[in-house]
Every structure is written in C-alpha cells, then in structure tokens.
C-alpha cells in the first residue's frame, strides 16, 4: 500500500507487542466478566480494526489500528482457550487444545493466502477489508450463538 520496508517492520512490532501487554487485562476480564462478551468484543474490535486500515490516512493511525488489532486478536485466542477449559477436562481438553492449534495454524495459512490473493486480484485494500469482514461475520455468529444458547431467565 505504498509504505516503506521500515514501516512494514515497525508494523509487525506494533501488531505483536500489544498482544503480550494486554494479556493480564484480558485474564482479569475473563475472570470477572462474561467470557462470551469478552470474546465478542475482541472479535468486533479486531474486525473493525482490519476494515479501517485502508481508510486511515496517516502512518500513526495505521500503527494504532495495528496495535488495537494485535491486542484484540490475541484476546480472542485467549478467550477461546479459556472457554475450552471451561467445558472440557482431561483427554478431551488435550484433544480440544490440539484441535485449536491445528485450526489456528490452518487459518493462518489459508487466511494469508486468501488475503494475499485478494490484494493481488482486486486491490491492496481488499486484503484487510476481507479479513475484517470475516471477523465481523464471526462476531455475528458468536452473538447469534450466545442468544440461542443463553440460559432461560
């Protein structure tokens, strides 16, 4: 999208660093609030961050979106692993954790390929927009699931 190699390297750092920094806050939220709500908010923030990138005019703004995105994606994974631990124990937990790892790796490979293809075939802005739309659709599925599976009051 016209940025320098130095900016690209800085972007990776800005994307990764907040994911480590927010983990204590995410753990605190997961212990004290609804885990589904934290997951839904994390997916929504990540989705909006992706969609916003092509429309942010400044490099500082893009870096801010990356920081928010990195924190939200990391929080989403932490939420998923925590909710897995709520539902399963023993061998089922180990199997579920292995399945999460496989799904995460597969999603990373397929997601990178689809995003790169979209950027080449359509426009550079298509990559983050498609990734954001997928995350926002996932957010809608999580909201629907929460509404359908909500315990009766």
Image (cartoon, helix red, strand yellow):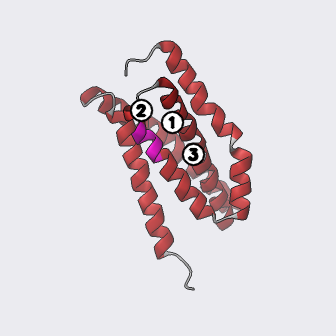
The answer to whether residue 50 is magenta is: yes
Please tell me whether residue 118 is drawn above or below residue 75 in the rendered image: above
Please tell me whether residue 143 is drawn above or below residue 121 in the rendered image: below
Residue 39: where, in percent of width, then height? 57, 57
Q: Residue at x 45, y 35 (%)?
A: 109
In three-dimensional space, the C-alpha distance between marks 2 and 3, rounded to whole angstroms, equals 18 Å
Kindly identify which residue carries mark 2.
Answer: 56
Kindly identify which residue carries mark 3.
Answer: 72
Magenta stretch: helix, strand or loop mostly = helix
Residue interval drawn in magenta: 47-52
Q: Which mark is residue 65?
A: 1
Contact between marks 2 and 3 (CB within 8 A): the answer is no
Which mark is nearer the camera, 3 or 1? 1
> SS for tag 3?
helix
Q: Earlier in the sequence, mark 3 or mark 1?
A: 1
Contact between marks 1 and 2 (CB within 8 A): the answer is yes
Q: Earlier in the sequence, mark 1 or mark 2?
A: 2
Q: Quadrant of residue 56?
A: top left
Residue 115: where, in percent of width, then height? 37, 34
In three-dimensional space, the C-alpha distance between marks 1 and 2, rounded to whole angstroms, equals 9 Å
Q: Residue at x 44, y 68 (%)?
A: 144
């Amino acid at each position: 999208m016209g940025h320098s190699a130095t900016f690209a390297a800085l972007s990776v750092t800005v994307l990764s660093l907040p994911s480590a920094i927010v983990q204590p806050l995410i753990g605190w939220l997961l212990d004290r609030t609804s885990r589904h709500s934290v997951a839904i908010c994390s997916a929504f923030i990540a989705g909006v961050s992706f969609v916003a990138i092509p429309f942010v005019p400044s490099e500082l703004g893009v870096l801010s979106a990356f920081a928010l995105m990195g924190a939200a994606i990391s929080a989403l994974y932490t939420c998923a692993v925590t909710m897995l631990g709520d539902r399963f124990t023993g061998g089922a937990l180990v199997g579920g954790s292995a399945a999460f790892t496989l799904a995460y790796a597969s999603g990373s490979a397929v997601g990178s390929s689809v995003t790169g293809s979209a950027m080449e075939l359509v426009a550079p802005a298509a990559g983050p927009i498609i990734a954001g739309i997928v995350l926002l659709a996932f957010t809608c599925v999580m909201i629907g699931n929460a509404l359908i599976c909500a315990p009766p009051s």
